[in-house]
């Protein structure tokens, strides 16, 4: 199963900062939470700032797809 998810912070859970996809949500959230140590893009800088303030990153699964190609089509639309 493949999952489409959003990331937000526990400080402002109603504000979606990122949309992504994965076949392993637990592993992917863990990678997001630790990637700022090695990366400097906007997403990871946002994650680092949220964590420095003592808040958590929240992952919400918004859709599930059996076929990975379906997700790739959605991404392009």
Image: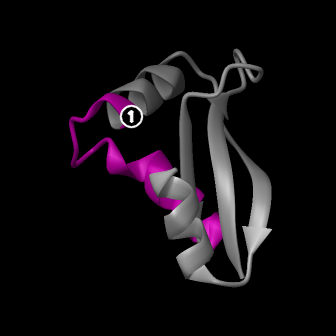
Is 32 rendered above or below residue 41?
below
Image position of 20 (left or right of 14): left
Query: Would residue 56 be visible to someone looking at this image?
Result: no
Horizontal and vertical percent for residue 62? 78, 51
The span picked out in magenta is 24-43
Residue 27 lies left or right of residue 58; in this view the side is: left
Image: 40 above or below 69: above
Residue at 72% across, 25% down: 10
Query: How far across and down, in percent of the image, does residue 26 sit?
Result: 65, 66
**Image coords of residue 76 (percent x, y):** 45, 55
Dominant SS of magenta comes to: helix
x 50%, y 67%: residue: 72
Query: Residue shown at 62%/39% (left/top)?
Result: 7
Q: Quadrant of the N terminus?
A: bottom right
- Up-down: is 17 above or below 5? above
Q: Please, is residue 47 above or below residue 34 in the view?
A: above
- Residue highlighted by disc 1: 43
Q: How is the image coloured?
A: one colour
Count how many numbered circles sit on residues in the image: 1
As helix, strand or loop, the secondary structure at mark 1 comes to: helix
Magenta span has 25? Answer: yes
Q: Residues within 10 Å of mark 1 (few under 14, many from 20)?
A: some
Which residue occupies the foreground of this view, 42 or 68? 68
Question: Can you tell which quarter of the image residue 27 is in?
Answer: bottom right
- Residue drawn at (69%, 66%) of the image: 3
Q: Is residue 39 in view from this perspective?
A: yes
Residue 52: percent from the left, percent from the top? 46, 21
């Amino acid at each position: 199963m493949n999952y489409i998810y959003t990331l937000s912070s526990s400080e402002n859970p109603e504000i979606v900062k990122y949309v992504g996809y994965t076949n392993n949500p637990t592993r992917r959230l863990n990678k997001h939470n630790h990637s700022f140590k090695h990366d400097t893009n906007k997403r990871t800088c946002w994650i680092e700032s949220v964590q420095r303030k003592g808040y958590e990153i929240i992952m919400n699964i918004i859709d599930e797809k059996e076929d990975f190609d379906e997700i790739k089509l959605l991404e392009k639309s």
